[in-house]
Amino acid sequence: MRTFNKSIIAVSVAAAVLSAAPAFATNGYFSHGYSTKEKGLAGAGAAYSQDALANATNPAGMVFVGDRMDVGLQLFSPSPRSYTVSGAPSGFPGTFGLAPESVDSENDYFLIPSFGYNMALDAVSSVGISVYGNGGMNTKYEPTAANGNMGVFGAGTAGVNLAQLFTNATYARKLNDQHAVGASLIFAYQKFAASGLASFAGFSSDPNNLTGNRNSYSSGFGFKLGYQGEVATGVRVGASYQSKMSMSEFDEYKGLFAEGGDFDIPSTYTVGVSFDVPNSGKVVVDVQKINYTDVASVSNPFMNMLTGCTPGAPATGAGCLGGANGGGFGWEDMTIVKLGYQWNTGDTDWRVGISKGKQPIPDSEVMFNILAPAVIETHFTFGMTRKMDNNQEFNFAAMYAPGNDVSGPNPMEAPGQQTIKLEMSQLDFQAGWAWKY
């Protein structure tokens, strides 16, 4: 395949990733995995890299995968994702009750492409590039008869749409035949829109830039560092660190997100190990930490809006929406354990996996997280690779995340008056094709 054609594929995939509006509410809003092969292993791959999207997990592994290009297409269904309100509004002055009802979000299916290319420079080094949707969130709750056709927050159709495009350029180098290090420069591009939040205008430091505006865009840079090596016969270890990425502000939503529209991307750590087992098998284990508390707009408690803000037009105080310590979604850090097993039968590799992590939403933070019900904790995965000839292969992965929920009080109602429950389950299918050179 000519270099020109490879470039056309890369640019086309980059545009498609962002336009696809990914809804990766899997581990918070991070995907459970990136490449098709890793997704079959529940996302594990820090110690064992297999394709040209390996740099999304550990850039050091790219020097072991050879010259290849991988293209994938994912069908993702986070359905249902819903909220249920129990208990009637009190009607007391100063309260904000929600209609007692259960509502499912619209938009149940998403197509998300991915791309990776790796090239050996010599016997000990390689360069690679990958393009993928790192994460996102999408909800859309239409008005219902139960809420008087006013919407969940009394201001029409409510929801958010967050999409993130990552372009990851990597250099990896072997220290010797068994050990390697790698580094990636990462460019991130985000888009965001929110609707149906006008009822919170009195708590916003900039109500004109709170809700219902056009898509807002943000960009920034970060880096990822990694190590991977064989420490004993059949035993490999790996570790990687991705920096916090300081992104430009979402100007059209600087009255929603803390610190004037700031929505940075949190840092992550991953460590992993892989073990060869008899009869062409391999066990892989990763532990990943996602530091959502790096980002004020994600981790600040919703209660900041109620305790650190004087309502007005605009509201004043550090705790106001958009303020220096503005109320947010209250997310906690996540630690995820990923376990996978891969084995070979002739021309086919088979994969299964499971991952487990505590979802990031405390029960005290359910009110605002109606917009972002990222409550998934467990993923079951299956995958396979079929060798088509000496230079091409077909890859497939499937994921099922069983339903999970979190319940807590409406903080804007009288104590014990209303309970809000958030729920979600997921299905995910990804197919990919790879060329080796």
Image: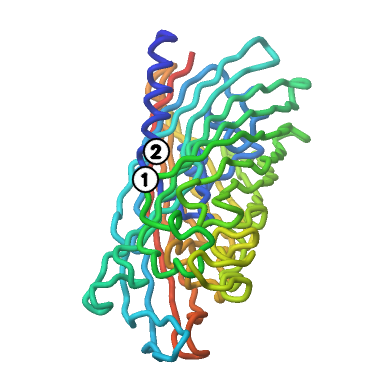
Viewer can see residue 283: yes
Q: Relative to residue 184, is residue 147 drawn left or right?
A: left
- Marks 1/2 in contact by CB < 8 Å: the verdict is yes
User: Who's the residue at 44% across and 78% down the image?
Assistant: 420
Q: Earlier in the sequence, mark 1 or mark 2?
A: 2
**Which quadrant of the view contains residue 307?**
bottom right
| Residue holding disc 2 | 396
Q: What percent of the width, then of the height, locates residue 51?
A: 53, 29
Mark 2 belongs to which amino acid? Answer: Phe
**Which quadrant of the view contains residue 249?**
top right
271 lies above or below 205? above
- Alpha carbon distance from label 1 to label 2: 8 Å
User: Who's the residue at 37% across and 60% down the image?
Assistant: 159
Q: Relative to residue 128, is residue 115 drawn left or right?
A: left
Q: Which mark is residue 337?
A: none
Q: What percent of the width, then of the height, locates residue 107?
A: 29, 54
